[in-house]
Image (tube, rainbow, N blue to C red):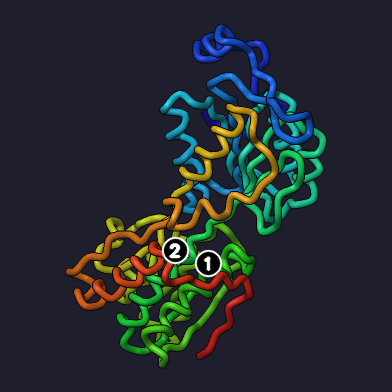
Amino acid sequence: MVVKSSGSVPLFSSGTIDRRQLLALGAGALVLSAVGAGEAVAAKAKPIKVAAIYTVPVEQQWVSRIHKALKTAEARGDITYKFSENVANTDYERVMRQYSQEGADLVVGEIFAVERPARAVAKDYPNVAYLMGSSFGPTKPNLSVFDNFIHEPSFLTGMVAGKMTKSNVIGLVGGYAIPEVNRLMQAFMEGAQSVNPQVKFIVTFINSWYDPPKAKEAAFAQIDKGADVLYAERFGVSDAAKERGVKAIGNVIDTSAQYPGTVIASALWHMEPTIDRAIKAVMDGSFTAEDYGPFSFMAHGGASLAPLDPKVVPPEVIEMVLVKEKEIKDGMFRVNVNDGEPKSTL
């Protein structure tokens, strides 16, 4: 269910109980955690109430992964799920506080631009569990953080780009130069350089999480400077690549079906390991402040490389990439986590 972020209508209605809530109440309201108050959020009856707060539309690639994982949990009957999308940063604290007041067991969101207000809300509601996308650490006792640590498959897509470029110029278009974007770009660039030391990069940030036209124009400018492979961290880049007949590398989701022959590789993010762990912790009363970032690693199934098409990517390149992928999964190769802002080298 979508809940608008404006107005004063309760986000969780205390006067209405659906069938699953009645069943949950019949099984018992909640079981106290074995650990003391302030150490873990008390156990909750199934299904738990989950609310999510998104600053962009749920169609946006990053947020769509969280939304998908929560919808999957909802379909299993583990949670009831409401969300607000397109919430302005200036309104984020109000929406977060209202969900907390109205009975959410778990609040999920992304607080990159509202770190201090969000952590203040969490402090005011110690019995609510919070799982927030953040570049910073957890806050005791009840605010956990996550991020899309898909740097490992990003390195692999960089290898594809490094082998596929003919001009030795690769463009990268990102949203903001923050750690969660920087580390993916840095890994991609390292992957490309590992197989092609001659490659140069053009890096552009559009300073927006969702502005496809702006991203598209930035990509056009990079193509005009010689880029024949583009790293599409934002929507709009693949459209430019398709129009100009160059290749694109996908990020977070696989859009190769929408851009056949254009998107040649994608690093995918899977939020299910993170979301499922948090839900279980709330249910059994073990939820505490921790960093869920590692659950986006390939070893936990939180990230993967989309299948490479031998009709688009040469078989020898695919073989090389798959060997490196196995080394990563086997713990024999570690991709650097570099949160520094990437710079153009052209």
Where's residue 267, x and y in %?
40, 62
In this rendered view, identify the residue nearer to me: 108 or 1.
108
Where's residue 116, x and y in %?
79, 50
Q: Is residue 177 above or below residue 133?
A: below
**Residue type, numbered disc 2:** Gly
Kindly indicate whether the residue at mark 1 contacts the one at mark 2 (C-beta within 8 angstroms).
Answer: yes
Residue 8 sits in quarter: top right
Query: At x 42% / y 70%, what residue is drawn?
Result: 332
Within-10-Å neighbours for mark 2: few <14, some 14–19, many 20+? many
Within-10-Å neighbours for mark 1: few <14, some 14–19, many 20+? some
**Residue type, numbered disc 1:** Lys
| Residue 92 left/right relative to 79 | right
- Measured in 3D between alpha carbons, the distance from the residue under mark 2 to the one under mark 1, in whole angstroms, is 8 Å
Q: Is residue 184 above or below residue 10?
A: below
Q: Is residue 187 visible?
A: yes
Residue 51 sits in quarter: top right
Q: Is residue 7 visible?
A: no
Residue 39 sits in quarter: top right
| Residue 239 left/right relative to 124 | left
| Residue 324 left/right relative to 208 | left
Query: At x 54% / y 32%, what residue is drawn?
Result: 280
Task: Give residue 236's mark.
Answer: 2
Residue wearing tag 1: 214
| Residue 175 left/right relative to 232 | right
